[in-house]
Image: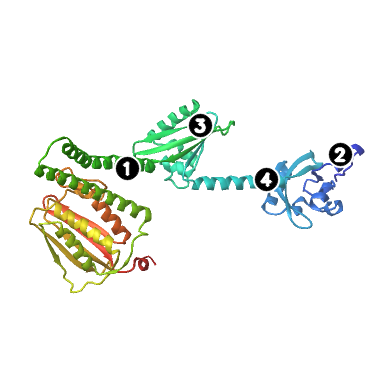
C-alpha cells in the first residue's frame, strides 16, 4: 500500500500551493489532499481521504476520469462544491512510479472559462449585428488576405446561396469579375487609398468602399462596402430631369424672347403685332401649364396625399365638368358618354384632383386623334374590385409597346409625334393622383389604331380598405 510522507520543506510548499494537489492510488482513491481542496470545494482533508476522484465530479466530464488515471495527461473537469455550485478545473495526472500511485493537480479555470464564454458571447453578438448590417464588411490580415466577410457582402459577391456552408469556404467560388475587383481593391489599399468605387457590369452595380487600418497581424484592414446603385440611379434621374426640364422651358422661352425682340426692334403693323402677341401668349400659357403640373407632382409626392380632400362624389358629375373644360377650349372632337348601368354609386375621391385626371386623359385623347373623330367614354362598376371604371378610347395614332411602357415617365414624348404640344407630364400626374386614391390607371394601345385608358376609382372610404 502506498504511504505518503513529505519532508518539512516539501510539506510547507504543498500546504501553500494555490492549486488542488492530491495523491491517489492507481484506482483514483485519494490518499492525500492539500488545504486548497477545502478552500475551493469546502471539503476537509478527512472528508476527502478514501473517496474516489469521480465522487467530486459532475456531468459528463467524469466519464473520462478512468482513462486519464490509467494513461495520464490532462483534461477539463466540472467539480461540485460542498455547499452547492460548481467550478471548472484543469486536471493534470502523472504516475509516481510503476506501482506507486498517482500525483495530480487541479487548477481553477472557472474565471478563464467565464471570460472565454463572455468573449464568445460578445463575438456572437458582433457577428449577428454585422449579419444585419446593410453594408458589406470585409476584414483583411496584414498580407491583404481575406479573413472575414459578413452576410451582406456574401450577397454582393453572390456566394450567399449555399445554405449551411461557412462564408470562408465559399470565397474560392467568387465570380471572376469580383475577383478582379478585389485584386484592384487590395492594390489600392496597399497604396494607402482609403475610399473609392467599384463598378460591376452584370448586373450593373456601383459599390462604394471605405477602408479603416489597424496595426495588427490578424486584422490589418476593415473595408465597408455599400451598394449605391439606387442612389446613383436617382442622381442620374435628377440630372436627366433637370436637363429635360431646362430644355422644355428653353424652347418656349426662346420663342417668347425672339418675338418680343422683333416687336422691340422692328416696325410692325397691327396684324403682325397681334400675331406675335398671340404666339407669346400661347408659349407663356404652355410654360405656366408645365410649371403647374410640376408643382402638382412635387406637392403630391412630398405630402403623399395629405392635402387631398376626400368625400363621396358622383363621378359622372365630375366627368361632365371635365368634358365642359375640353369643349370650352374649342375642341372639335366628339365626346360620347355611355353608361350601361342606370345609376352609378358615389366614389370616395377628391373631386378637384379627379377632374384634373379626367381633363388630362380626355385632353390627350383629343390631341392625338384626327379632327372630327369620336372619343368614346364608358362608365361602369367592377363588382369584383369594388371600383368604378371609366374607359376613354380614341381612334388616334396609337402607340407602340415601347411607348406604352414609358408613358408614365416625366417629360417622355414619343419622337414620332413632335407636332403635338405638351410637356410630357400629364400622365405622370394622372398616375400619382390615382395611386393616392388607391385606384388604378391602365393603358392599352396599338400603333395606328388608337388608345384606351382605363381609370379605376374606389367605392369605399380608402381608410376602410386599409383597416
**First in residue order: circle 4 vs circle 1:** 4
Please tell me whether residue 117 is drawn above or below residue 194 in the rendered image.
below
Residue at disc 4, secondary structure: helix
Q: Residue sitting at 35 percent across and 58 percent down?
A: 305
Circle 1 packing at 10 Å, graded few (<14), some (14-19), many (20+), is few
Q: Is residue 218 above or below residue 33?
A: above
Tag 1, which secondary structure? helix
Name the residue beneath numbered marker 1. 237
Sequence-wise first label, 2 or 1: 2
| Residue 23 in picture, x, y percent from top left | 82, 44
Q: Check disc 3 and report the residue beneath it.
A: 145
Q: Is residue 381 above or below residue 117?
A: below
User: Viewed as shown, does residue 163 lie left or right of 215?
Assistant: left
Q: Nearer the viewer, mark 2 or mark 1?
A: 1
Query: Where does the C terminus fall, quadrant-wise?
Result: bottom left
Contact between marks 4 and 1 (CB within 8 A): the answer is no
Viewer-nearest residue: 49 or 159: 159
Residue that carries the numbered disc 4 in the rendered image: 115
Query: Mark 4 or 3 closer to N-term?
Result: 4
Write the residue at 16% across / 53% down: 445
Q: Residue furthest top?
A: 191
Disc 4 and disc 3: Cα gap in Å? 29 Å
Q: Looking at the image, tell me whether mark 3 or mark 2 is earlier in sequence order.
A: 2
Image coords of residue 271 (percent x, y): 9, 44
CA–CA distance in space, label 4 to label 1: 54 Å
Q: CA distance from mark 4 to mark 2?
A: 30 Å
Q: Position of residue 290 (x, y in %)?
A: 25, 48
| Residue that label 2 marks | 13
Amino acid at each position: 500500500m502506498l504511504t505518503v510522507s513529505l519532508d518539512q520543506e516539501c510539506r510547507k510548499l504543498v500546504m501553500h500551493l494555490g492549486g488542488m494537489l492530491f495523491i491517489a492510488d492507481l484506482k483514483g482513491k485519494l490518499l492525500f489532499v492539500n488545504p486548497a481542496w477545502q478552500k475551493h470545494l469546502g471539503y476537509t482533508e478527512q472528508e476527502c481521504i478514501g473517496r474516489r476522484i469521480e465522487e467530486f465530479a459532475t456531468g459528463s466530464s467524469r466519464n473520462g476520469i478512468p482513462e486519464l488515471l490509467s494513461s495520464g495527461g490532462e483534461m477539463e473537469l466540472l467539480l461540485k462544491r460542498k455547499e452547492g455550485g460548481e467550478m471548472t478545473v484543469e486536471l493534470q495526472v502523472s504516475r509516481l512510479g510503476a506501482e506507486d500511485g498517482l500525483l495530480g493537480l487541479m487548477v481553477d479555470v472557472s474565471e478563464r472559462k467565464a471570460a472565454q464564454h463572455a468573449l464568445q458571447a460578445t463575438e456572437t453578438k458582433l457577428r449577428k449585428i454585422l449579419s444585419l448590417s446593410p453594408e458589406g464588411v470585409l476584414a483583411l490580415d496584414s498580407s491583404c488576405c481575406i479573413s472575414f466577410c459578413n452576410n451582406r457582402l456574401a450577397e454582393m459577391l453572390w456566394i450567399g446561396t449555399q445554405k449551411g456552408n461557412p462564408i470562408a469556404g465559399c470565397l474560392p467560388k467568387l465570380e471572376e469579375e469580383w475577383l478582379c475587383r478585389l485584386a484592384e481593391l487590395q492594390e489600392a489599399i496597399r497604396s494607402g487609398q482609403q475610399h473609392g468605387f467599384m463598378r460591376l457590369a452584370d448586373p450593373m452595380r456601383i459599390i462604394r468602399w471605405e477602408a479603416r487600418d489597424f496595426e495588427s497581424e490578424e486584422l490589418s484592414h476593415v473595408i465597408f462596402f455599400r451598394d449605391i446603385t439606387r442612389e446613383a440611379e436617382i442622381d442620374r434621374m435628377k440630372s436627366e430631369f433637370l436637363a429635360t426640364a431646362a430644355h422644355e422651358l428653353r424652347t418656349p422661352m426662346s420663342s417668347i424672347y425672339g418675338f418680343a425682340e422683333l416687336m422691340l426692334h422692328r416696325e410692325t403693323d397691327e396684324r403682325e403685332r397681334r400675331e406675335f402677341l398671340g404666339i407669346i401668349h400661347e408659349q407663356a400659357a404652355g410654360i405656366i401649364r408645365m410649371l403647374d403640373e410640376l408643382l402638382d407632382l412635387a406637392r403630391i409626392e412630398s405630402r403623399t396625399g395629405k392635402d387631398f380632400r376626400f368625400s363621396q362624389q358622383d363621378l359622372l358629375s365630375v366627368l361632365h365638368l371635365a368634358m365642359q373644360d375640353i369643349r370650352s377650349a374649342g375642341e372639335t372632337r366628339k365626346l360620347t358618354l355611355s353608361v350601361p348601368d342606370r345609376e352609378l354609386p358615389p366614389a370616395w375621391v377628391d373631386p378637384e384632383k379627379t377632374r384634373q385626371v379626367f381633363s388630362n386623359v380626355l385632353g390627350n385623347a383629343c390631341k392625338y386623334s384626327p379632327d372630327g373623330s369620336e372619343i368614346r367614354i364608358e362608365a361602369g362598376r367592377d363588382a369584383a374590385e369594388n371600383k368604378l371604371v371609366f374607359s376613354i378610347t380614341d381612334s388616334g395614332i396609337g402607340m407602340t409597346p415601347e411607348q406604352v411602357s414609358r408613358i408614365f415617365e416625366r417629360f417622355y414624348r414619343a419622337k414620332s409625334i413632335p407636332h403635338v404640344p405638351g410637356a410630357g407630364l400629364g400622365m405622370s400626374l394622372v398616375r400619382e393622383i390615382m395611386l393616392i386614391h388607391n385606384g388604378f390607371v391602365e393603358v392599352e394601345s396599338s400603333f395606328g389604331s388608337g388608345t384606351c385608358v382605363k381609370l379605376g376609382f374606389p367605392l369605399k372610404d380608402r381608410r376602410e380598405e386599409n383597416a
